[in-house]
Image (cartoon, rainbow, N blue to C red):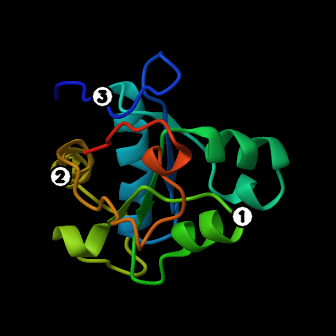
Amino acid sequence: MAKQTLCSCAGGDASRIIFPCGGQANTGQISNQAAIQLEEEGYGKFSCTTLLVSSEDLVKKAASMDAVIVIDGCDKACARKIAEKAGVPVYQHLMIPDLGVEKKTGDRSFTQEEVESIASAAWKGEGVLSASQKGSTCSSQGCGCSKE
């Protein structure tokens, strides 16, 4: 995948942080693997979603990023709820079942093709939330640049 730049208001490269759900089903495992792959491809930094509950430093870091990407494995949207409860605005929300991968509770198996489909969806900009669906964005912080 080609690297894609979002907003670089501070004059540097765009910064993204990725929070996967990490659930026990296949889709939770896919969310972790997709986050790892996206980090390796240079899309953003993979971080532990659960730490948003107890780490003020991580919350501050995430809130200062150009984009927060959340990858959820099911419609319970636990990772997104954790981020939002911590006050971290979500820019892009990928819901794995909405991207064509069925959740199989009790089955952790998945294919590399499923992981690639989720990583590709992130690179394509799927799941980018509208202004009414997300918290603050780069442009609402007054820098005047566009993330799309």
Count every numbered label the image shows and give the total: 3
Neighbor class of circle 1 (other Cα within 10 Å; few <14, some 14-19, many 20+) is many
Q: Nearer the viewer, mark 1 or mark 2?
A: 1
12 or 29: nearer the eye?
Answer: 12
Q: Nearer the viewer, mark 2 or mark 3?
A: 3
User: Could you tell me residue 121's position as x and y percent?
Assistant: 20, 52
90 or 115: nearer the eye?
Answer: 90
* Amino acid on which disc 3 is placed: Thr
Residue under numbered circle 1 = 86
Examine the rendered structure and indicate whether residue 30 appears above or below residue 142: below
User: Could you tell me residue 20's position as x and y percent?
Assistant: 49, 56
* Amino acid on which disc 2 is placed: Ser
Mark found first going from the N terminus, 1 or 2 = 1
Among the 4 quarters of the image, the one containing residue 127: bottom left
Quarter placement of the C terminus: top left
Question: SS for tag 1?
Answer: loop
Examine the rendered structure and indicate whether residue 146 appears above or below residue 70: above
Is residue 9 visible to us here?
A: yes
Determine the CA span between mark 1 and mark 3: 26 Å
Determine the CA span between mark 1 and mark 2: 29 Å
User: Could you tell me residue 2's position as x and y percent?
Assistant: 17, 25
Question: SS for tag 2?
Answer: helix
Mark found first going from the N terminus, 1 or 3 = 3
Residue under numbered circle 2 = 117
User: Could you tell me residue 114's position as x and y percent?
Assistant: 20, 55
Is residue 101 visible to us here?
A: no
Residue under numbered circle 3 = 5
Determine the CA span between mark 2 and mark 3: 20 Å
